[in-house]
Image (cartoon, grey):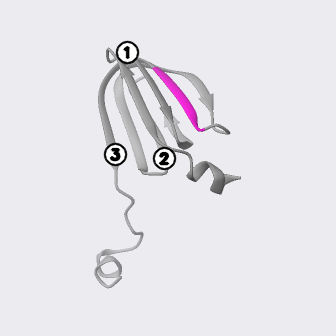
Amino acid sequence: MAEDRMQLPHKLTLNERKALTMTGVTEVVSFDDGAVILKTGLGTLVVQGKDLQLKTLSLDGGQVAVDGHVTALVYEENRPSGGLLNRLFR
């Protein structure tokens, strides 16, 4: 089932920096009123803002909605684990 969620298309819609809807979300890592961290098929997405609230959460469908004042959307690339030497010689 988790593999099926990985294949969902990833799409973002932001309306007036107040309402963000997303598809293709596989996991909610953490959330509070200043940041929401989500895993998607395209990497980890960090939503930063003020007064953020998780309005919709449907991981079976990969859908998430966040309300509040969005100040930044940042994707973090998946990094290999281990030390510097381990990453150099992969």
Figure quadrant of residue 61? top right
- As measured in the structure, the alpha-carbon distance from the residue carrying label 2 to the one carrying label 1 is 21 Å
Residue 63 pos. (x, y %): 57, 32
Highlighted magenta segment, given as a residue range: 62-66
In this figure, which residue is indicated by the disc labeled 2? 40
Q: Earlier in the sequence, mark 2 or mark 3?
A: 2
- What residue sits 40% from the left and 73% below the top? 82
- Above/below status of 38 relative to 80: above
Q: Is residue 64 left or right of residue 51?
A: right
- What residue sits 39% from the left and 69% below the top? 80
Mark 1 residue crowding within 10 angstroms, few (<14) / some (14–19) / many (20+): some
Farthest residue to the front: give it: 9
Farthest residue to the bottom: give it: 89
Residue 20 pos. (x, y %): 43, 23
Mark 3 residue crowding within 10 angstroms, few (<14) / some (14–19) / many (20+): some
- As measured in the structure, the alpha-carbon distance from the residue carrying label 1 to the one carrying label 3 is 19 Å
Q: Is residue 69 left or right of residue 27?
A: left
The answer to whether residue 35 of the structure is visible from this angle is no
Proximity of marks 1 and 3: CB atoms separated by less than 8 Å: no
In this figure, which residue is indicated by the disc labeled 1? 18
Q: Judging from the image, what secondary structure is the residue with disc 1 in?
A: loop
Task: Give the amino acid type for the residue marked by disc 3 in the picture.
Answer: Tyr
In this figure, which residue is indicated by the disc labeled 3? 75
Figure quadrant of residue 79? bottom left
Proximity of marks 2 and 3: CB atoms separated by less than 8 Å: no
Task: Give the amino acid type for the residue marked by disc 1 in the picture.
Answer: Lys
Magenta span has 63? yes
Characterize the magenta stretch by its predominant secondary structure. Answer: strand
Q: Judging from the image, what secondary structure is the residue with disc 3 in?
A: strand
The answer to whether residue 53 of the structure is visible from this angle is yes
